[in-house]
Amino acid sequence: MAKAFSIPFVAFFGRNYQEYLAMFSLDESSLRGRSILDCPSGPDSFVADGTQQGLDVIGCDPMYAMSLEQLLKSGKGHIDECFAQIEQTPGNFDIRDMEKFRRDKYDALESFSKDYLSGKGTRYIDASLPNLPFGDRSFDLVLSSHFLFCYSSVENGGMMQGNMFDLDFHLTAITELARVTRHELRMAPTHSMQAPPRRHPYLEASVKHLESLGFAVTIEPSVYDDGFAPFVEVLVGRR
Ligand SMILES: C[S@@+](CC[C@H](N)C(=O)[O-])C[C@H]1O[C@@H](n2cnc3c(N)ncnc32)[C@H](O)[C@@H]1O
């Protein structure tokens, strides 16, 4: 059995715009005219590149309390630490093109960092789950990736050393994401972060919870294969 991939912190590690569209199974035209929240957005470039493309998108993340210099230092450091861990725990991530995967993270960090100062406080908001500074049903579409599910403890399908993001935390955070959603909430990935590939152990309870909040939930195919096929999926909750 592969040695578990684990880290002691939530990485400031982000995907680029094309990865976001693929991961959430979205095309750009379907996003036009919708207000969108990316939570957490970390150093992904969805906010920066989406804004360039004319989308109405806001990102939030607790790291936005920091200066650009600190964010760049964390971003580069965390990418390097994550890839070092991936190399030390072979067999966990079955990523076909590791060099492209790494390059995409650096590209995202670069686009994010060029946009950050002009959007700080307007499209980059310092906020953390489970308490967001937005009104009820503020966003047509809410996207949430690579925080919930991924940072549950290793024993609970995630990659975090420690259990600070347990099932109770997840359900409370999902309640908050649902509160700020007007129409649609998408969450990815749905798989556990450990080999062999399987659905995340919190997924079923999370789906039931969202249903209890009035959402119709489906698990839909995605094309963003980050090494956990066949569980290449996105959770879609619609009011
Ligand atoms: C791996 S990044 C994900 C970024 C982006 N969603 C993506 O998929 O590329 C995880 C982010 O979660 C943020 N984070 C940590 N604690 C959080 C909390 N309590 N609420 C919201 N975000 C949090 C971190 O600062 C980090 O930027």
Image (tube, rainbow, N blue to C red):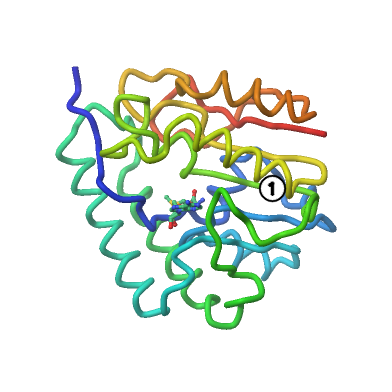
Q: Locate residue 171, reporting x and y percent.
A: 57, 33
Is 23 above or below relative to 192?
below
The quarter of the picture where residue 229 lies is top left
Q: Locate residue 196, reporting x and y percent.
A: 32, 18
For mark 1, give the secondary structure. Answer: strand
User: Who is closer to the viewer here, 214 or 87?
Assistant: 214
Q: How many marks?
A: 1
Is 73 above or below relative to 18?
below
Quick one: which residue is furthest to the bottom in this view? 118
Q: Is mark 1 within 8 Å of ligand 1?
A: no
Residue type highlighted by circle 1:
Val
The quarter of the picture where residue 176 lies is top right
Q: Which residue is mark 1?
A: 142
Residue 30 placement, left or right of 74: right
Q: Locate residue 18, reporting x and y percent.
A: 57, 51
Q: Locate residue 120, reporting x and y percent.
A: 57, 77
Residue 201 placement, left or right of 83: right
User: Who is closer to the viewer here, 176 or 32?
Assistant: 176
Quick one: which residue is furthest to the left in this view? 88
Q: Residues within 10 Å of mark 1 (few under 14, many from 20)?
A: many
Q: Residue at x 82, y 34 (%)?
A: 239
Q: Quadrant of the N terminus?
A: top left
Q: Residue at x 30, y 56 (%)?
A: 79
Is 2 above or below relative to 184?
above
Q: Residue at x 54, y 67 (%)?
A: 126
Q: Residue at x 73, y 50 (%)?
A: 180
Residue 164 placement, left or right of 28: left
